[in-house]
Every structure is written in C-alpha cells, then in structure tokens.
Amino acid sequence: MVDFQIAERYGMDDLLKIMELLRAPGGCPWDRAQTHRSIRSNMLEEAYEAAEAIDRMDMANLKEELGDVLLQVVFHARMAQEADQFDFDDVVDGICKKLVFRHPHVFGTAEAQDPEKALDTWDGQKRTEKGQRTAGDALDSVARALPALTRASKLQHKAAKAGFDWEDVSPALDKLSEELEELRAAVQEGSNVEEELGDLLFAAVKVGRFVQADGETALQKACEKFIRRFRRVEELAGGGLEGLDVPALEALWRRAKAAERH
C-alpha cells in the first residue's frame, strides 16, 4: 500500500503525486512500462474525445475528457523528469512565457483592436520565436501528425497569407475538375493513383476554404450521413444486405436519401 491520503477533492499537486506513485517501484506495472512512444496514440485519442464533447456541447463529458488530456500531459512530463530532461513545472513555465511573448498587445505596447489583428500579431510573434524567415519555413512548421485534411487547410492558409492563392473560388473549382480527370486517367492506367487521389483531396480542401467550409468538418459530417443512411438502408432491406445486387442496393440508397429530404 502506497503512502497517499485519500481526499474528497484533489488539486494539481495531488495529480502530480499520483503519477509519481504510479511510476515508482511498487506502483502500477502498466504505468511503469510506458514510454513517450507507447502512449503517443493515447494523447491523440484523448484530444479527439475532448473535441467530440465540444461538438456535442456535453459539458459533463468535456470536464472528464479534459482531465484525460491533462493526464497525458502529466504522464509525459513525469517520464521526462525521470530521465532528467524536464518536469511539469518546466512545461508550465514554457507555456506561460509563450503566452506573454505572443500577446504583446496585452503584455506589451502593441495594439490589436479585433480578433483578426490579434491573430496576425500571434503569428508574427510565432515566426520570430521559431526563427521562420520565409513562408516556406512557416509551411514546414505545420505539424505532420495533424489529420491530413486539417494539415492541407493550414498549409493553404499560410501560403495564401504569403500571396500564393487565387482571387476567387472559380479557378479552385477548375483545378478540382482537372485533378478528378487526372485521377480517372491514373485509375485507367493503373499508376500514380495514390498521388492523384491526394491531389484531388488537396484541391477539394482549397475549394472548401474559399466557401468557408472546413474540409475535416465536412468529411466528418459526410461520415455521419453515410452511417445514418446505411442504417436506413438496412431497415428498408429488413435487416442484412447479403444477397442483394448492386441495382437493388442503389435503389435502397436512393430511398434512404429521399427520406431525409422530407
């Protein structure tokens, strides 16, 4: 039994102590066996679950999921402390210094009268902080671990701020059509299919940016719509879809789609 006082309510120091005990000799075998890499996916999963709670505006669930995200931060910080690299206080110190430096319109003499100007100031301070001298440097700094559609949008946004963009959506739509034809040709020839598919998706994200439609959000909604309509198709088919040919499935899909419009 570890030396720990059970309480009705805990604070940040308690969380740090709990993680220390879990990782210590005699603690939890699973927690002790973890590394930064072994729990990398956990960080992503918890962040996505928090995002889903926000989408649903479920505050009770958001409170829980934010705790799970915080646990990941504490977990990584503890492992780094054990390796004499940094500790949780260093993490807190770092983010505090970053916030002060990137808000000169709050903690300094710069001015920002609206959210757009404040964001421009943040971006400018970030480029200075990271030593980004060119737009290419800014593009290269976009995290490669981001979902691809989100990364594409961020890359395009940074390129647009450097002047690399069309003036309206029309050329973007033309580019989307061009990439679709190139994908058709690649499929027929059996070569470069993955590359052309990527170009098509990238072009679709560009169109979305011009009409203020986020590609990641749009695709998530399309996924939910697919699930909803698929379930409706199953209902219309009376259960399983086994044995139905393509024309029958397409007919059921059209019925499911039409039902949503009424």
Image (cartoon, helix red, strand yellow):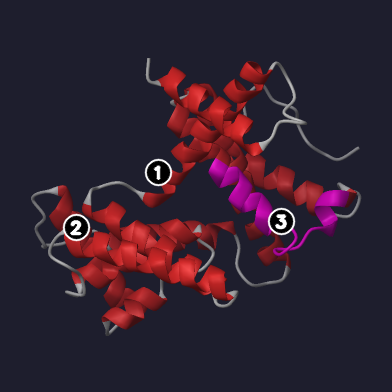
Q: Which residue is mark 1?
A: 218
Mark 3 and mark 2: Cα distance apart in space = 42 Å
Q: Is residue 31 visible?
A: yes
Does residue 27 show up magenta in the picture?
no
Q: Quadrant of residue 178?
A: bottom left
Does residue 37 show up magenta in the picture?
yes
Question: In this rendering, would 213 be left or right of 253?
Answer: left
Q: Which residue is mark 2?
A: 169
Q: Is residue 125 visible?
A: no
Few, some or many residues within 10 Å of mark 3 (<14, 14–19, 20+) = some
Few, some or many residues within 10 Å of mark 2 (<14, 14–19, 20+) = some
Q: Which residue is mark 3?
A: 39
Q: Hey, what amino acid is under mark 3? A: Ile
Please state the total of marks drawn on the protein image.
Answer: 3
- Which residue occupies 51% across, 60% down? 91
- Which residue occupies 73% across, 43% down? 18
- Helix, strand or loop under label 1: helix
Earlier sequence position, callout 3 versus callout 2 = 3
* Magenta residues, dominant SS class: helix
Quadrant in which the C terminus is drawn: top left
What range is drawn magenta here?
30-48
Q: Quadrant of residue 180?
A: bottom left
- Helix, strand or loop under label 3: loop
The answer to whether the residue labelled 3 contacts the one labelled 2, judged by CB atoms less than 8 Å apart, is: no
Q: Hey, what amino acid is under mark 2? A: Val
Question: Residue 241 or 72: which is nearer the viewer?
Answer: 241
Quadrant in which the N terminus is drawn: top right
Question: Residue 74 or 187: which is nearer the viewer?
Answer: 187
The picture places residue 143, in percent across and down from the top left corner, at 47, 67
Earlier sequence position, callout 1 versus callout 3 = 3
